[in-house]
Image: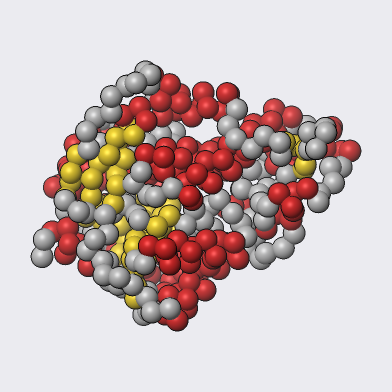
Amino acid sequence: MGMKTTVLLAALISLNSLPAAAGGFEDSLSTENLLSMEVPAAAEAAPARDAASDYARYYSALRHYSDIAFRSEPGTEAYAEAYIAANYLNGRLESLRGTGAAKSARIDLDFLGPDRATLAEIDAFFGWGNVMKGEQLSPPVTIKAGFATIKYVKGNTPFLVQGDSFLKKGEIILTFDDGPDTHGLTAAVLETNEGVAPSIFFVLGSKLGPAGREVIKAQARKGHEVSLHGYWHATETGKPFTAYSTSQAMADLQKTAGLIKNATGKDPAFFRPPYGIISPAALRDAIDELGVTPMGWTIDTLDWSTRNPDELFEKTVSLISKRGKGIVLMHDIHPQSVQVNVRLIQWLKDNGYKVVNPETATRAFRGN
């Protein structure tokens, strides 16, 4: 290209702050769309210079890791590392929304990937910076043969690997994380899925104020499972449950479980740890003390990585078609996910798939 190509990026990843309607160049992260944009001279004088630089490097790294996660098989070390890193980066981008960073961030298309500063930041956040060359990973820990295993990945990080052998070909379990949304997105999912697609909603206790409690009441009333994700995601600073002691993790989950039961009148049936990261001891305590079924996923839509509903739909049905069955991970807090959910429910019906009741997983785990 000669001189390195730079473009203006405007809020491509700050999904929660974006309107539901598609339109504008934010709808696609394609290189073709980015190259077609002009950089206004005013961008040179943007006040959020440091934040813009951070936004640019997080965005570049997110593209790199989300591409790896999409191409990799869930449960492999490559997938786990990429998924964990990408989730962290998406959170960092979310934290920069509203600062003007996205509007003045200049993305270098000759380098889409993590730079040294970003790698060091991720390593420090997850404790990966202490990894020694040739370090021996701890052996996997079986929670339930064929159903759930804790596999250790980079830095001996315990990652929940889900099995779906209990599902027959064509059977799907739909799951949604990080809600409830109280501005209509979760309500739209409930309207679409009512009576045709019983789902699991893994909720955050920090979102269960008065409005949030009303949403999960509706979820339970419409036959869905309102289940545990954690109070925060997972600690208040966004670190995984491994930053807590086992007793601290249990206190977090008990608090959230109490909020769910008070609102719905029912104990949560499932638990999915944020990032998929949880120690075997903490997971077993959650199973024994709270009576939950651990639930990872086997089809990751990466719905936070694109705002384009068409792109997301094609990726999702491609992943489902390739596997033929599975536990689908989505989020009821993103407009593009809510739009795709409508199309997905119809596509599943038209192509001979069946959304099964989540109790199928409980019976498999409990051996009934």
Based on the displayed image, in which of its 4 quarters is residue 362 positioned?
bottom left
Seen in the image, is 126 located left or right of residue 24? left
Q: Is residue 46 above or below residue 345?
A: above
Way the structure is coloured: secondary structure
Quadrant into which the N terminus falls = top right
Does 245 sit left or right of 335 as displayed? left
State whether residue 155 is above or below residue 251: above
Determine the image quadrant of residue 157: top left
Residue displayed at 46% across by 40% down:
82
257 w.r.t. 241: above or below: below
In front of the other: 293 or 349: 349
Q: Would you say residue 216 is visible in this rendering?
A: no
Q: Position of residue 156 (x, y in %)?
A: 31, 29
Q: Position of residue 213 (x, y in %)?
A: 38, 60
- Horizontal side of 33 relative to 315 (left or right) equals right
Residue at 47 percent across and 76 percent down: it is: 347
